[in-house]
Image: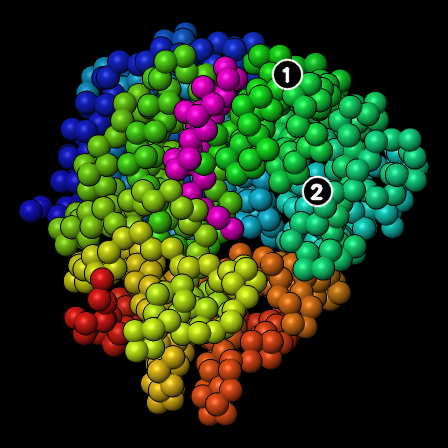
Amino acid sequence: MDSSPLAAVSLVLLASFLFFFSSAQSSTIGVSYISELLEIQDRERALPHVQVAATRGVLQRLLPSHTSSFEFRIVSKEQCGGESCFIIKNHPSFTRRGAPQILISGVTGVEVLAGLHWYLKYWCGSHISWDKTGGVQLNSTPKLGSLPRLQDDGILVQRPVPWNYYSNAVTSSYSFAWWDWKRWEKEIDWMALQGINLPLAFTGQEAIWQKVFQKFNISKEDLDDFFGGPAFLAWSRMANLHRWGGPLPQSWFDQQLILQKKILARMYELGMTPVLPAFSGNVPAALRNIFPSAKITRLGNWFSVRSDARWCCTYLLDATDPLFIEIGRAFIEQQLIEYGRTSHIYNCDTFDENTPPVDDPEYISSLGGSIFEGMQSGDSNAVWLMQGWLFSYDPFWRPPQTKALLHSVPIGRLVVLDLFAEVKPIWITSEQFYGVPYIWCMLHNFAGNLEMYGYLDSVASGPVEARTSENSTMVGVGMSMEGIEQNPVAYDLMSEMAFRQNKVDVKEWIDLYSARRYGRSVPTIQYAWNILYHTVYNCTDGAYDKNRDVIVAFPDVDPYFVLMLQGRHRTNGKPVSRRLDCAKNSDSYDHPHLWYSTTEAVRALELFIAGGDELSGSSTYSYDLVDLTRQVLAKYANELFLKVIESYRLKDRHGVAHQSQMFLDLVEDMDTLLACHEGFLLGPWLESAKQLAQDEEQQIQFEWNARTQITMWYDNTEVEASLLRDYGNKYWSGLLKDYYGPRAAIYFNFLARSLENGHGFQLKDWRREWIKLTNNWQKSRKIFPVESNGNALNISRWLYYKYLGNPDTYDH
């Protein structure tokens, strides 16, 4: 089989040809509901020459060697058949030496760059992903002057729905918390190339709130108590907590506002529609004293271990109170003053993890109407964008309550994000959100956890099924992950669905994906990807994939509770009689998620290693190899932990010691593996936090924020761990060796002591020790590498033979 890049491209061209000439589907009912807003946004968009200049800036940063090869133009929707589209043609001067070869036109700069990406992907066999997941693969792009020609008529690709949404209310903390302009510029480039035109733009809002609340006589000290720290702003914005990780220094407010203005300016230059925040009712506690007659409610505890008033139990202003509209208007107006313009779409999630006090539909309708009035009073063209997460997890939202909220706003002025549509689509069970426009979103990731996971078949078909369903009110697709820079295959496919009229054959697509990602087609690697498609990327069990592998989310339970869950708590065929606080223990142990055959995953790793010599030097291959090796070894570690516990049940001291040491050796070896690629390092997370600090005191505060988010997360006592511990866990080199390994060692030492002394497992003492370790680690100033070290293929091969070479390693 020919393994050259052009051979791969020829296969792509066949698939592309069939796609490009498929007929476009008609717009949904939902699109007609938002047509007025779309017309306003078209009129207010940046001038064509501004958008073209911005797109050329992206090309210069992406492919500086080929800037003269492309010409970009902005065209009207009429030239696109009445919809947004991109058009790719041979340039009229294609044959003239030194002239542009390819002409790409689009309704906005985003469509132009999506067209550029499509050309590079499907004519040049290239690949674009985040730097941390391997970055770009452009080696397959032919040299200057030799770009592939298109058929004479070129191609025209329409968006089947107007919007391509991006981000989540918490992505700003799990991924964006420490970004500077250089990193933001890269992300906006990536967004545009993926066709994203509706990004959430939450940066710097605390500076706006500071100015707004000062107008309502809230002091600086009161605001210090209101805002969370830099790594926890997402949750203080949502009224889940206050002050945790704070207070924010004034320099933070100032630099983040400057950053937001740069972000918005670039988004507008590219023709994007940034989504700004709106007032949800979250207010400082001091507002009760200034407005004693206002309807302000103290919310309940949100995961604080003992309802600590220093950061728990925030305050919510009732939307029906006249003060709500006044503050809502002031917030919108202050943003207009600072930013000079708006896209008229505002995100507000008053009821996300905050259930209304009364389930009367009329009351809920009045709440929704007042929330919208707060936006509309500041912007007469306002449209409310709401996350639909509450409808998927909170039993409060039965059909009458859901309808009351959704119908409290004029049709077309509320758009819902079907946040977890690839797994739990709400549009199906709610009759198209009871006639309200919605965006089909892929949630995919929680807390930025690193886990090879996805449901590619759902991504490839779900948006099409929703759009073509009877009376569809779908108006967009989106990516609503909690954390980015992981599983690039899922995001590559999801971004394409913004331009796909028909379902995608994932088997064919995945073959082409591997060729594009590495710059050439390697049969063994293609076979491995086929296995991955049918295993790790075929999760159909409907479970939330929060990574609870033992290494990164070590069980905080009595070992007999683990045995009970495993069905292994039997002696001589009889159940072990042991009193356990099951409710308390169940809160402390989530069984690791496993939805595929680990034997098949090991086989995929074998093939990845076998094909590695043909892909030496490829950063995309190195990332995937490290990630797959990590995935396989992590599941092996789960089994190894159970063997330790089984040896403990049998009172086998030697077995406990031997298996425990194997586990700890594995953790250290995995740390060495992860050090081989920049996408798996702890150092950059900590250093980027410190680089935003203005002095030593801020460095200490910001680093504590960064360390705390990925370990304990929230508050604890000496013997009670945070209820959110390990929610933000990461498989990062440095974190395994410096924290996860030592924590596991403490547990194993308590197991050994229990057997030596003949007493039960000292759970309380274990907790005291590991909580102390964690709190000390949070305050540590140890520096970790920011650059990779080691050969991924050599280390992966070594670890495979060390831990997996025995065919009996996995028994399932």
Location of residue 706 by image quarter: bottom right
Q: Is residue 160 left or right of residue 448?
A: left
- The residue where tag 1 is placed is 409
| Residue 243 vertical position relative to residue 419 in the rendered view, above or below | below
| Residue 464 vertical position relative to residue 663 in the rendered view, above or below | above
Q: Name the amino acid, label 1.
A: Val
The residue under the point 38% across, 55% down is 593
> Residue 794 colored magenta?
no
Distance in Å between CA atoms under marks 2 and 1: 23 Å
Give the extent of the magenta segment. 421-447
Q: Residues within 10 Å of mark 2 (few under 14, many from 20)?
A: many
Q: Name the amino acid, label 2.
A: Ala
- The residue where tag 2 is placed is 239
Judge by depth and name the residue closer to the eye, 300 or 352.
Answer: 300
Q: Position of residue 774 (x, y in %)?
A: 60, 71
Q: Looking at the image, can residue 317 be seen?
A: yes
| Residue 67 vertical position relative to residue 767 in the rendered view, above or below | above
The residue under the point 64% across, 30% down is 348
| Residue 254 vertical position relative to residue 656 in the rendered view, above or below | above
Location of residue 204 by image quarter: top right
The local secondary structure at tag 1 comes to loop
